[in-house]
Each structure stands twice: as structure tokens, then as C-alpha cells.
Amino acid sequence: MSQTYSQGTVQQSVSTRLKLIAGPDTKGTYVFEDSRGEYRLFMATTTDPFSRVEDILQNGEWVGQWRGSQW
């Protein structure tokens, strides 16, 4: 199940397509892939499973990003 979300005001109005790759783990961490092939790590404030990416991104903060296999 892959979900896509067009970012608007979530991150400095950057127009980026995000695809949910993994998550959440027990700490509420999600991994997204953007349209440039970069991975972004998002830490949610709750570990409750959300059905929509929009809901996930309203409950937490971006904590990192990397390209390919580089952490």
C-alpha cells in the first residue's frame, strides 16, 4: 500500500511528491521517499496508525533526510 502526498505548507511550501516507504515503528518513525529519490525521516508525536499521509504529517516533525543508501 503506497500513499502519495503533495506537500504544501508542511515544509517551506516545497512542492514535492512523497511516498510512504515504511512506518510507523514503535517510536512513531516513518520513512518517505520524495520525487528526487531522497529519503526523509519523519518522527510522529503518536504511534497510532493513520490512514492518510496528510494526517501523519500534521502530527510530528522532520528529523532527517538522505539520498540512496547514505544515512
Image (cartoon, rainbow, N blue to C red):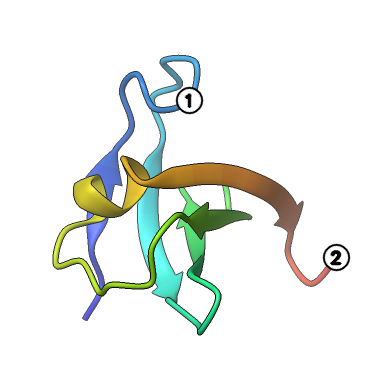
Residue displayed at 45% across by 46% down: 60
- Residue closer to the observer: 61 or 34: 61
Q: Residue furthest front?
A: 46
Q: Amino acid at mark 1?
A: Gln
Q: Is 23 located above or below residue 3 in the figure?
A: below
Residue displayed at 49% across by 15% down: 12
Where's the C terminus, which quadrant? bottom right
Q: Is 11 located above or below residue 19 in the figure?
A: above
* Other-residue count near label 1 (Cα within 10 Å), few / some / many at <14 / 14–19 / ≥20: few
Report which quarter residue 44 is drawn in. Answer: bottom left
Q: Is residue 50 left or right of residue 43?
A: left
Where's the N terminus, which quadrant? bottom left
Percent position of residue 41, x then y? 60, 57
Q: Amino acid at mark 2?
A: Gln
Q: Is 5 located above or below residue 15 in the figure?
A: below
Mark nearer the N terminus (1 vs 2): 1
* Other-residue count near label 2 (Cα within 10 Å), few / some / many at <14 / 14–19 / ≥20: few
Percent position of residue 39, x then y? 61, 58
Q: Are marks 1 and 2 in contact (CB under 8 Å)?
A: no
Q: Which residue corresponds to mark 1?
A: 11
Percent position of residue 61, x then y? 53, 42
Label 1 or label 2, whichever lies nearer to me, is 1
Q: Which residue corresponds to mark 2?
A: 70
Give the CA separation, mark 1 to mark 2. 22 Å
Q: Is residue 70 left or right of residue 13?
A: right
Q: Is residue 63 left or right of residue 46?
A: right
Please tell me whether mark 1 sits on a helix, a strand or a loop: loop
Please tell me whether mark 2 sits on a helix, a strand or a loop: loop
Q: Residue furthest left?
A: 51
